[in-house]
Amino acid sequence: MANFTIADIKALREQLGTGMVDTKKALEEADGDLEKAVEILRLKGAKGNAKRADRSTSEGLVVAREQDGKVTLIELNTETDFVAKNDRFIALADKVADAAAAVSADSVEAALAADAGGKTVAQLIDDEAAIIGEKVELRRVRTLTGDHFEIYLHKTSKDLPPQIGVVVVYSGDDAETARSIAQHISFANPTYLSREDVPAAEVEKEREIVTEISRNEGKPEAALPKIVEGRVNAFFKQVALLDQDYAKDNKLSVAKVAQDAGITITDFARFKVGA
């Protein structure tokens, strides 16, 4: 019988985030040698990476790094929440965020090509995925620049690492209000900063849709322009941050809250794992 215990299996699983059966088999093959078992799991995992290529990665975490007047936000995904909360996966995300921030990566491609201790981020992810035994994917990366930043990382479950990450770029001195707006963004999920940033084609498409809806509702033709304009304005309040009703006081817009605090929001990013 192999020289290992249930505690050894548990410790190795917690270290690597591997499955119970695979961990037990590796320890059996390694005759209880933990280092050799890690090698076995890594080799078997490397062979399995290609087989896992088409699997879904809907779990994971977000990490933000501030460096040299910039903030880099990443989303790293895996298959299960068991791995997402594993120390090894969290450490991998930290290394990826550090490497991406070092080159101010603003795309997945740029981040994957970045150096991570003598290998590329892509190679690092492949190596760790082989050990972990699940598909691991760098899904999104963005680097923001500006005067000041507020970073808000939100846990959707107390047992998991942050799954919503928000970065607000602003000028002014009221960090407390900037943080409150970051929290608003995590909840309200705006797509654009202002209505001027919404592509004209998207606005026109929305206008066409609400016009048709209004006609189908039997609204008078003479009243259509005003009704359509009201509904287009409602659309802006959904997608444009500065037009949105402030989560803490829906009588105020986010733009008004920022103005009253003496700050100007110049950019933002929001990542939600799997969304």
Image (spheres, rainbow, N blue to C red):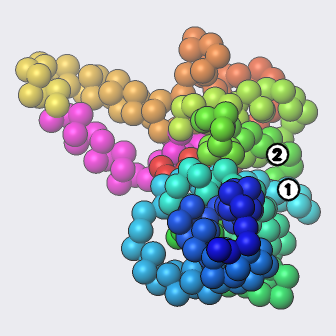
Q: Which residue is mark 1?
A: 66
Dot 1 and dot 2 residues touching (CB under 8 Å): yes
The amino acid type of the residue labelled 1 equals: Glu
Assign a secondary structure to mark 1.
strand
In the image shown, does 191 or 63 lie closer to the viewer? 63
State the extent of the magenta-drawn residues as a range.
Answer: 190-212
8 with respect to 125 (left or right): right
Asked whether 43 falls inside the magenta stretch, the response is: no
Dot 1: few (<14), some (14–19), or many (≥20) neighbours within 10 Å? many
* Amino acid type shown at disc 2: Phe
Tell me if residue 13 comes above or below residue 40 in the rendering. above
Q: Nearer the viewer, mark 1 or mark 2?
A: 1
Instruction: Tell me the distance, in whole angstroms, between the alpha carbons under discs 1 and 2.
Output: 9 Å
Query: Tag 2: Cα neighbours inside 10 Å, few (<14), some, or many (≥20)?
Result: many
Q: Write down the residue under mark 2.
A: 149
* Vertical position of residue 76 compared to residue 251: above or below: below
On whether residue 207 falls in the magenta region, the answer is yes
Q: Residue at x 79, y 83 (%)?
A: 115
